């Protein structure tokens, strides 16, 4: 059974139409069962072939019956595969949860299912009533302040963001002409993986990686592994304060949606100041562009994470344009809504 057939679709089909909302609980049950398996390293233990629940329990020092039941749950959802004799093996979905798996999502899953990301959902009503992120209400500090106070979580977050690669990211890299920009600043660029991907495809371009000191600390290793370290300048900076001037393009990926319009406007203002009078320079934003009313859109779901955990938001094209117009930018392309997209802006003359 494929994962797409095992979770909401099958359960929903078994319920009367007026009860189908209850199928949503299957996601909670499955995530709850899967997280301890990933924490215990069960995907790694299955890397060399199928094992029984008893064998896995012995290797992980866990209760055999309890372990079997959570394995059975995740297999029913199509994540692992259950065979005869209470044995379990990998599927493509579970292989991606192995440590160091190519294209893996282990750290993304562990971060997204961590207690700090669950607890804000205990009081979404607070957000709806006040407009304040319930994360701040629950923890007494903001999302990023909490990460700063918990280095282990901060490191997990950084690893998760490195794995955070939508399929549309590859489409953007393949279709957008980054090579027309000689010098590209990646603002809030983390460890530099996306910038490295761009420069690998654009051998005549160079880059500037801009982020906080603790974030870019491991960037040299990432850039060296991609063979582009000699073409990247690393600048320790806070994008609310300043970014380097003199670049042909200022790229900001998966960062503006972390902030409300006021703070996202501050980031745009900093970039506008760096651009100065260069009418040829561009601001490039890689983020979700929402569809109109009633349309399916994963961004309308991730918007709730932005709302509840970070106080940010996903935006439609019109919302992006209004936000950027207030900071002196006008659109230079027409991104397709409904997925991750690249929005290009030029400065208003």
Image: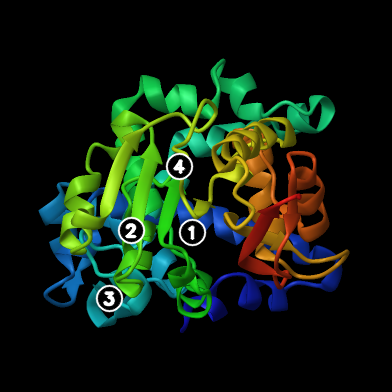
Q: Gap in Å between the C-alphas at discs 2 and 4?
A: 17 Å
Residue under label 1: 30
Q: Gap in Å between the C-alphas at discs 3 and 2?
A: 41 Å
Q: How dense is the environment of label 3, judged by Cα within 10 Å: few (below 14), some, or many (20 and up)?
A: many
Q: Gap in Å between the C-alphas at discs 4 and 1?
A: 33 Å
Residue 54 seen in render:
no
Identify the disc placed on residue 206. 2
Q: How dense is the environment of label 4, judged by Cα within 10 Å: few (below 14), some, or many (20 and up)?
A: many
Mark 1 near mark 2, Cβ–Cβ under 8 Å? no
Q: Secondary structure at mark 3?
A: loop
* Residue 78 picture location, percent across and down: 44, 75
Of the two numbered discs 1 and 2 in the rendering, the one whose residue sits closer to the viewer: 2
User: Which residue is at a point 53% across and 72% down the rendered structure image?
Assistant: 168
Identify the disc placed on residue 286. none
* Residue 64 picture location, percent across and down: 23, 55
User: Which residue is at a point 66% across and 28% down the rendered structure image?
Assistant: 134
Residue under label 4: 188
- Residue 212 lies in what quarter of the image? top left
* Residue 130 picture location, percent across and down: 81, 24
Q: Please indicate whether residue 169 sits to the left or right of residue 226 in the image.
A: right
């Amino acid at each position: 059974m494929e994962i797409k057939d095992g979770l909401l679709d099958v359960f929903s089909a078994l319920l009367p139409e007026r009860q189908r909302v209850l199928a949503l609980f299957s996601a909670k049950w499955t995530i709850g069962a899967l997280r301890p398996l990933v924490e215990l390293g069960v995907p790694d233990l299955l890397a060399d072939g199928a094992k029984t629940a008893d064998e896995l329990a012995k290797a992980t020092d866990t209760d055999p019956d309890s372990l079997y039941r959570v394995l059975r749950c995740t297999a029913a959802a199509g994540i692992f595969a259950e065979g005869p004799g209470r044995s379990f093996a990998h599927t493509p979905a579970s292989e991606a949860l192995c440590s160091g798996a190519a294209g893996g999502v282990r750290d993304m899953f562990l971060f997204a299912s961590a207690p700090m990301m669950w607890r804000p959902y205990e009081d979404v009503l607070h957000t709806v009533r006040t407009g304040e992120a319930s994360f701040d209400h629950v923890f007494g500090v903001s999302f990023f302040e909490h990460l700063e106070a918990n280095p282990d979580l901060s490191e997990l977050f950084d690893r998760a963001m490195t794995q955070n690669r939508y399929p549309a990211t590859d489409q953007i890299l393949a279709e957008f002409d980054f090579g027309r920009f000689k010098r590209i600043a990646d603002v809030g660029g983390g460890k530099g993986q996306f910038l490295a991907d761009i420069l690998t495809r654009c051998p005549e371009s160079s880059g500037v990686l801009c982020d906080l000191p603790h974030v870019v600390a491991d960037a040299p290793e990432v850039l060296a592994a991609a063979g582009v370290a000699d073409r990247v300048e690393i600048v320790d900076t806070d994008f609310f304060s300043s970014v380097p001037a003199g670049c042909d393009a200022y790229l900001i990926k998966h960062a503006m949606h972390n902030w409300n319009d006021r703070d996202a406007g501050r980031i745009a203002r900093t970039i506008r100041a760096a651009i100065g009078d260069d009418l040829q320079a561009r601001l490039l934003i890689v983020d979700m562009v929402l569809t109109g009313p009633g349309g399916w859109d994963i961004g309308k779901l991730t918007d709730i994470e932005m709302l509840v955990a970070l106080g940010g938001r996903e935006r439609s094209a019109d919302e992006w344009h209004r936000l950027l117009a207030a900071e002196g930018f006008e659109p230079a392309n027409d991104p397709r809504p409904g997925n991750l997209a690249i929005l290009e802006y030029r400065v208003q003359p």
